Image (cartoon, rainbow, N blue to C red):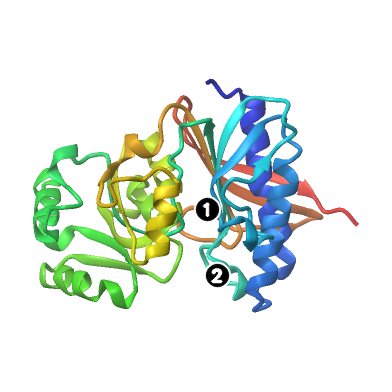
Amino acid sequence: MVFKKDFLDKIINITSNAAIACYPHLGKNDKVLVDKTATDEMRKNLNQLDIDGKVVIGEGELDEAPMLYIGEKLGTGEGPSIDIAVDPLEGTNFAANNLPGALSVLAISAKGNLFNAPETYMDKLAVSNDVPFDATDLDFPIEKNIKNIADCKNKGLNEITACILERPRHREIIDKLKKLNVKLKLISDGDVAGALLVADKKHDIDLFLGIGGGPEGVLAATALDAFNCKFQGRFLFKTDEDIKRANNMGIKDLNKKYNLNEIVKGESIFCATGITSGDLVNGVKCENGKFITETLVTHKNSSINIVKKEVPILD
């Protein structure tokens, strides 16, 4: 399936509009309101597209509305069959407290091309595209991964930078990285953006690792696919309910390690619009009667762009 430029523009508009809708609620310390605002705006815009869309990566189950739930049908039903992955507001705390790094994220592909990930945790590894595929692996000891990356890049261990969510569950990994004298970029939230840093040379992030959301892993993989970066993930099922949900979604091997090409196939579009300014893109600005947005766009068959849009402020 080939996505034309006018369709790509419409996808960019969807995340841009969701970001703009959040603007009045930034810094109001109301996570529920700002998240609902982003979700409602994204749903409204997706339903205006001429697609037969279905959410495969969403924000929960049917009874957890108003989130864009897994299995929700979107679009007019008059166009192509599309898989949709959404995170209308990644970094809810960032937006509620007007902190850097909040994004509105959307990925689409033809039906059957995006992995239908359960709402559970995923152990992840993302590596920049200048490291050979077999040099790193989710199952390698962290020391081996770091040393192999350093060798491939002709760097010292103290020149390697690893990005990881700052969580108690990562204390052991962080301690090992410190012993290796690796530089750390610790992030408090937003592991879609964290994983994407390995693709952006200006940040000099060599790898992203650790446990985060499974749905966010699929979103990150969709973006990294356009950069030819490495991504691996393994879902972590902690409860009987997790396992039941996985089985219902067709996942039989609960310990399977997924490579990027098993998570996203074929052509896809990934858009992430800044709500508040962060490492990847600037947030929404209000200047001279206009909203100004920046969107990171990845599309396998075109150049990777930062797209700026100006939208008049309506009275």
Residue at 74% from the left image edge and 57% from the top image edge: 287
Does 265 appear above or below 91? above
Q: Which residue is mark 2?
A: 94
User: Quick check: 72 left or right of 213?
Assistant: right
Q: From the viewer's side, name the closer residue of 67 and 141.
A: 67
Q: Is residue 217 visible?
A: no
User: Quick check: 314 left or right of 155?
Assistant: right
Residue 192 at x, y = what percent? 44, 55
Residue at 44% from the left image edge and 29% from the top image edge: 300
Residue at 58% from the left image edge and 63% from the top image edge: 276
Q: Amino acid at mark 1?
A: Val
Q: Nearer the viewer, mark 2 or mark 1?
A: 2
Q: CA distance from mark 2 to mark 1?
A: 14 Å
Of the 4 image quadrants, the one containing the C terminus is bottom right
- Residue at the far right in the pictured view: 315
Does 315 appear above or below 79? below
Secondary element at image label 2 = helix
Specify few, some or many for label 1: CA neighbours under 10 Å numbering under 14, 14-19, or 20 or more.
many
Which of marks 1 and 2 precedes in the sequence? 2
User: Quick check: 281 left or right of 311?
Assistant: left
Q: Amino acid at mark 2?
A: Phe
Residue 110 at x, y = what percent? 53, 29
Residue 258 at x, y = what percent? 29, 43
User: Quick check: 89 left or right of 211?
Assistant: right
Q: Is residue 122 visible?
A: yes
Q: Which residue is mark 1?
A: 281
